[in-house]
């Protein structure tokens, strides 16, 4: 028996079997990975867009640069995020009472006709009809959105900037199961009076290290909001030539750290 095991034929057979076994294992791993990717990718999942417009006295949308930049960004958001039936966009005003300041709620209602069994000509007609209806809907939504951008807040609520209050709004949107995209049209200068709050107008972070310490400390107060992993973008009102005193980079670092600590969320700044 021992002699047979060491015969060249059996050695060759063993080597071939090993290679086949390894190949089978590799294919299984690739297959599992593909299945996982397929499960995670949900191309038709609705998009839930949250737009937070800063309506406090530190952001001047009446300035030409700010208004042009914000108008273009809002146009891009409508174009990129409102593509299919069920895609939703909500606007909240950032001020003293942010979480209760919903100003607009829009949902795409245009719907493609059933393409099943349709020939190429019919498919093209269905798609053209859908895109025409969608573009008309988007045009209406953009006008409503730009009207909210230019709406002035002359009340006393413009004296406080409660950006923390946007977190429960984000958490609520995440419960819908949609892909959540968040946009802050703001200088992100949190300014709320109180012993356990931040007022970056009077006491901004003076270094990235201080910003990180503050953010990690605040995470303990805010981690009860399960915000998930939204896509977060800050559309700042600052011109490229703005000084660091006006556009404090440590404030941006504070928010980047806070979102990272709350759920590994990365922040993009425009």
Image: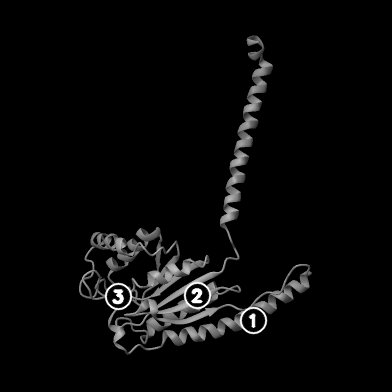
Which mark's residue is nearer the viewer, 3 or 1?
Answer: 1
Residue picked out by circle 1: 133
The residue positioned 62% from the left and 27% from the top of the image is 18
**Element assignment for label 2:** helix
**Foreground: 155 or 23?**
155
* Vertical side of 254 occupied by 161: above or below: below
Separation of marks 1 and 2 at Cα, in angstroms: 18 Å
Separation of marks 2 and 3 at Cα, in angstroms: 25 Å
Residue that protrudes farthest toward the front in the picture: 224
The residue positioned 60% from the left and 84% from the top of the image is 136
Picture quarter with the C terminus: bottom left
**Element assignment for label 3:** loop
- From the viewer's perspective, is 122 left or right of 262? right
For residue 227, the mark is none
Residue picked out by circle 3: 242
**Foreground: 265 or 177?**
177
Residue 270 in view here: no
In primary-sequence order, the first of circles 3 and 1 is 1
The residue positioned 56% from the left and 56% from the top of the image is 40
- Percent of width and height locating residue 84: 60, 73
For residue 77, the mark is 2
- Percent of width and height locating residue 4: 67, 12
Sort mark 3 into few (<14), some (14-19) or many (20+) by Cα contacts within 10 Å. Answer: few
Q: Are marks 3 and 1 in contact (CB under 8 Å)?
A: no
* Vertical side of 226 occupied by 67: above or below: below
The residue positioned 74% from the left and 72% from the top of the image is 123
In primary-sequence order, the first of circles 1 and 2 is 2
Residue 120 in view here: yes
């Amino acid at each position: 028996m021992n002699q047979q095991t060491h015969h060249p034929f059996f050695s060759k057979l063993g080597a071939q079997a090993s290679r086949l076994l390894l190949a089978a294992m590799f294919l299984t791993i690739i297959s599992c990975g593909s299945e996982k990717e397929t499960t995670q990718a949900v191309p038709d999942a609705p998009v839930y867009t949250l737009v937070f417009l800063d309506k406090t006295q530190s952001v001047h949308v009446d300035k030409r640069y700010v208004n042009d930049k914000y108008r273009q960004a809002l146009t891009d958001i409508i174009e990129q995020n409102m593509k299919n039936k069920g895609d939703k966009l909500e606007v909240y005003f950032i001020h003293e009472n942010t979480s209760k300041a919903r100003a607009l709620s829009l949902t795409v209602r245009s719907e493609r006709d059933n393409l099943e069994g349709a020939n190429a000509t019919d498919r093209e007609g269905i798609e053209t009809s859908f895109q025409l209806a969608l573009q008309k809907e988007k045009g209406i939504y953009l006008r409503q959105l730009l009207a909210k951008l230019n709406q002035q807040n002359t009340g006393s609520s413009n004296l406080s900037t409660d950006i923390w209050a946007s977190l429960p709004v984000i958490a609520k949107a995440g419960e819908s199961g949609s892909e959540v995209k968040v946009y802050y049209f703001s200088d992100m200068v949190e300014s709320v009076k109180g012993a356990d709050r931040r007022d970056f107008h009077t006491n901004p972070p003076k270094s990235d290290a201080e910003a990180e310490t503050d953010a990690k400390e605040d995470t303990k107060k805010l981690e009860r909001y399960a915000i998930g992993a939204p896509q977060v973008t800050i559309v700042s009102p600052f011109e490229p030539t703005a000084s660091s005193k006006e556009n404090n980079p440590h404030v941006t670092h504070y928010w980047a750290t806070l979102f990272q600590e709350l759920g590994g969320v990365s922040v993009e700044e425009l």
